[in-house]
Image (cartoon, grey):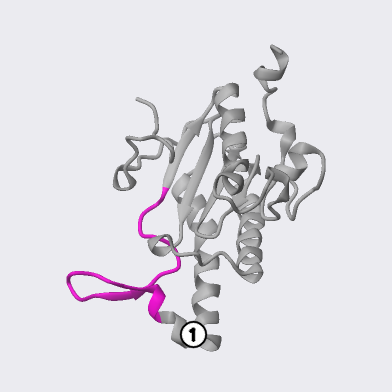
Amino acid sequence: MGVQTPHSPTAKRKTCRRYDQPGHAHSLTFSCYQRRPFLTRPRTCEWMLGAIVATRAKHNVHLWAYVIMPEHVHLPLYPTRPAYNVSRILTTLKQSVSKRAIHYVRVHAPAFLKQMVDEQPSGRRSVRFWQRGGGYDSNLWSPRHIWETIDYIHGNPVRRGLCESDADWHWSSAGAYLGVADGPLAVDTESLPDDPRRLNA
């Protein structure tokens, strides 16, 4: 059974399963609370970049690509250790951003806090930056699927009408792949398999 991708018509947010298979990469997608555009400010995107850097160091993962959209994040990551835990990787990626954002809003923009309040039917209230649940997780092992996933996430800003070309979006690794800009984070291309579409061209 394959792992559903975020653009699969049958994907369901509440049925995400994680398969921590040695040698597999993971295409991770996680969204802001109620898909609200909490990632529009440069400072928040910088916090996300900092969390990615910390995750690389703590969990020994390679960053193959990234796109930070206004309300969600795409990250194909390759764990270099045989044993790893995607749930723990996600915690490192998300927790510090959430804490910094909520603290900032409480101190500097308390009126905005109501947009982050999650009230459950039980009456329990909590303040959230990220949507509840782990988001989407698709295992990657086929070179073709890996490269198609990278192309897909790089094209996200263009499909949304946020820019005219993949490389125009600052919070992305697209420019590095196209050879026109390095982007705010370097990517670990040395562990990528060759693109079979180019080999067969």
Q: Residues within 10 Å of mark 1 (few under 14, many from 20)?
A: few
Residue position marked by numbered label 1 in the rendering: 106
**Which residue is outermost to the top?**
200
27 relative to 95, above or below:
above
Q: Splitting the image into 4 quarters, where does residue 80 fall?
A: top right
| Residue 142 as seen in the image, left or right of residue 49 | left
> Could you say where residue 39 lies in the image, as x and y percent from the top left?
56, 64
Where are the magenta residues, as a range? 114-135
Let me know if residue 22 is in the magenta part: no
Return the x and y of residue 1 as percentages of the image width and height.
34, 25
125 or 19, which lies in front? Answer: 125
- Taking the spot 50% from the left edge, 68% from the top edge, the residue there is 98
Q: x%, y% of residue 141?
A: 54, 26
Residue drawn at point x = 35 percent, y = 35 percent: 9
| 131 is within the stretch colored magenta | yes
Residue 167 location (% of width, % of height): 72, 45
Residue 97 relative to residue 36: left or right: right
